Image (cartoon, rainbow, N blue to C red):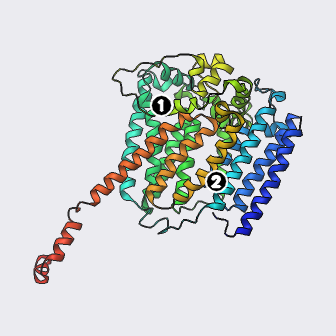
């Protein structure tokens, strides 16, 4: 992940400047929303190819994972519609003639992001591994043990929270019932359990000895299936994605056909689960019919993050920018609610809500009043705070920092764990807001720090039967050591 020569850096940068100039001109002159959709779709594909082959970024690297999720979540509906292969009549909010501002912002976001990647790769120094991915700096049994203990704690907390939502009828809960009860009762064990399990899986994978790789991967797979069956598709996909990306950095090799098969199955399962998750837990898969979904419904639903962006562009004039308030709301949510008696947060004004709640209240009041939501957008939040300039600066800095994070992740198992616990919540912001980033990221870094502290602390003490006995035996006379060994 480095442009080796100065002349190569100049060629790559000049080539991207030409591409950026063409697509900026197209954005300014095109009047048809469908043509703009095709244009931004082509730009996304060019950006992925440019990052992969010109910059040498791995598909499992942090910059590439975020870029691909950004494209899928914002263009999954627009591009098939522009190609005429999907029927959007089942999405009444989709107004083709109102897409231009949102598509322009997506174009500028991709251009800024790719420019940040080029600058970061071109100016970064090469980071060498002291050891291979399965060497002593990456094989960390103490980190694996910490992740394993945290995993079981998180699962117990989640199950306790799930049952606590409705102790007498939790097995009859639908997805909507779960959201309603979380808003009306104490949800702390439920949400904290999900957060801790994802952190635990990344810690365990970052430090696992090679013989424990299957254990972590099976645990991640079972957690994915469990969450997906409950209807929580986003957290399930992010969890398995970040564990597999960490496994690749540890040297695990998957068959080449497996990622494609997994992606196809997820795209098929997404619309299926969207239909059946409104059935009770103990009755799902009972009355499913092929007429209930289309094979492209998964791509279209993933691409529905264009809606919050379209609505935000229409609702936020330049004089109403939030100037960073939404990020402050996310920082305020880092601290856990440790009150002995839980109370629902006060509603306040609509403008004081986090972005995902705010856009739902403004664009779909019925869903908001019934504890539903339409998500949010990685492009919409910087625009909501600082306008077009915020989008450009945010995506440039994000790309630059992700490359630096990628370079630092190969230093040790703790660096890899930090990479994973930050990247997981960050990927979630592709179709959410920073309210859902700061808490899991900070908690994850805190867990890594605690594991590192206790590992260092115990390293200073002699381990019974090993280090202390060895040092003592080295100080014994040779004849005395021989007598004790007999």
- The foreground one among 268 and 99 is 99
Query: Mark 1 or mark 2: which comes first in sequence?
Result: 2
Q: Position of residue 129 (x, y in %)?
A: 50, 67
Q: Residue at x 56, y 23 (%)?
A: 353
Going by the image, does 357 lie left or right of 188?
A: right
Q: Position of residue 300 (x, y in %)?
A: 73, 36
Q: Residue 259's mark?
A: 2
Which image quarter: residue 77?
A: top right
Q: Residue at x 74, y 56 (%)?
A: 49
Secondary-structure class at tag 2: helix
Q: Residue at x 85, y 34 (%)?
A: 33
Quadrant showing the N terminus: bottom right
Secondary-structure class at tag 1: loop
Q: Residues within 10 Å of mark 2 (few under 14, many from 20)?
A: few
- The foreground one among 297 and 287 is 297
Q: Position of residue 468 (x, y in %)?
A: 20, 66
- The foreground one among 164 and 415 is 415
> Which residue corresponds to mark 1?
333
Quadrant showing the C terminus: bottom left
Going by the image, does 453 lie left or right of 36?
A: left
Going by the image, does 371 lie left or right of 203?
A: right
**1 vs 2, front mark:** 1
In this rendering, does residue 295 appear at all? no
In this rendering, does residue 414 appear at all? yes
Q: Position of residue 83 (x, y in %)?
A: 85, 40
410 over 269 or under it: above or below: below
């Amino acid at each position: 992940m480095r442009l080796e020569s100065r002349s190569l850096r100049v060629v790559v940068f000049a080539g991207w400047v030409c591409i950026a100039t063409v697509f900026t001109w197209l954005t300014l002159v095109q009047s048809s929303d469908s043509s703009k959709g095709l244009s931004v779709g082509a730009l996304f594909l060019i950006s992925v190819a440019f990052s992969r082959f010109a910059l040498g970024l791995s598909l499992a690297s942090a910059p590439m994972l975020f870029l691909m999720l950004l494209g899928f979540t914002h263009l999954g509906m627009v591009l098939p519609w522009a190609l005429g292969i999907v029927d959007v009549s089942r999405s009444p909010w989709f107004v083709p003639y109102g897409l231009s501002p949102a598509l322009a912002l997506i174009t500028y976001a991709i251009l800024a992001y790719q420019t940040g990647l080029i600058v970061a790769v071109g100016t970064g120094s090469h980071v060498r591994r002291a050891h291979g991915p399965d060497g002593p700096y990456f094989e960390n049994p103490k980190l694996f043990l910490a992740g394993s203990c945290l995993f079981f704690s998180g699962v117990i907390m989640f199950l306790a929270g799930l049952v606590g939502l409705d102790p007498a009828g939790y097995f009859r809960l639908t997805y909507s019932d779960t959201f309603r009860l979380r808003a009306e009762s104490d949800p702390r064990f439920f949400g904290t359990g999900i957060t801790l399990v994802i952190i635990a899986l990344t810690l365990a994978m970052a430090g696992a000895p090679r013989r424990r790789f299957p254990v972590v991967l099976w645990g991640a797979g079972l957690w994915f299936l469990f969450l997906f069956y409950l209807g929580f598709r986003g957290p399930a996909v992010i969890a398995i994605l970040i564990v597999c990306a960490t496994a690749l950095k540890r040297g695990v090799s998957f068959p080449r056909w497996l990622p494609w098969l997994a992606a196809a199955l997820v795209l098929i399962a997404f619309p299926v689960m969207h239909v059946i998750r409104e059935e009770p837990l103990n009755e799902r898969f009972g009355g499913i019919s092929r007429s209930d979904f289309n094979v492209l419904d998964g791509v279209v639903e993933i691409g529905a993050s264009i809606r919050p962006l379209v609505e935000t562009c229409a609702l936020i004039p330049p004089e109403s920018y939030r100037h960073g308030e939404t990020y402050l709301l996310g920082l305020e949510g880092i601290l856990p609610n440790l009150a002995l008696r839980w109370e629902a947060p006060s509603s306040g004004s609509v403008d004081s809500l986090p972005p995902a709640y705010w856009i739902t209240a403004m664009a779909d009041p019925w869903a908001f009043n019934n504890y539903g939501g339409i998500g949010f957008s990685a492009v919409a939040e910087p625009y909501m705070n600082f306008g077009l300039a915020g989008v450009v600066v945010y995506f440039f800095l994000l790309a630059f920092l992700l490359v630096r994070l990628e370079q630092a992740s190969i230093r040790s198992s703790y660096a890899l764990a930090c990479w994973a616990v930050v990247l997981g919540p960050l990927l979630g912001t592709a179709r959410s807001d920073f309210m859902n980033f700061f808490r899991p990221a900070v908690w994850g870094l805190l867990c890594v720090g605690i594991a590192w502290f206790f590992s260092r602390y115990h390293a200073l003490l002699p381990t019974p039967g090993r280090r202390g006995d060895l040092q003592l035996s080295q100080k014994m006379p040779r004849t005395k050591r021989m007598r004790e060994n007999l």
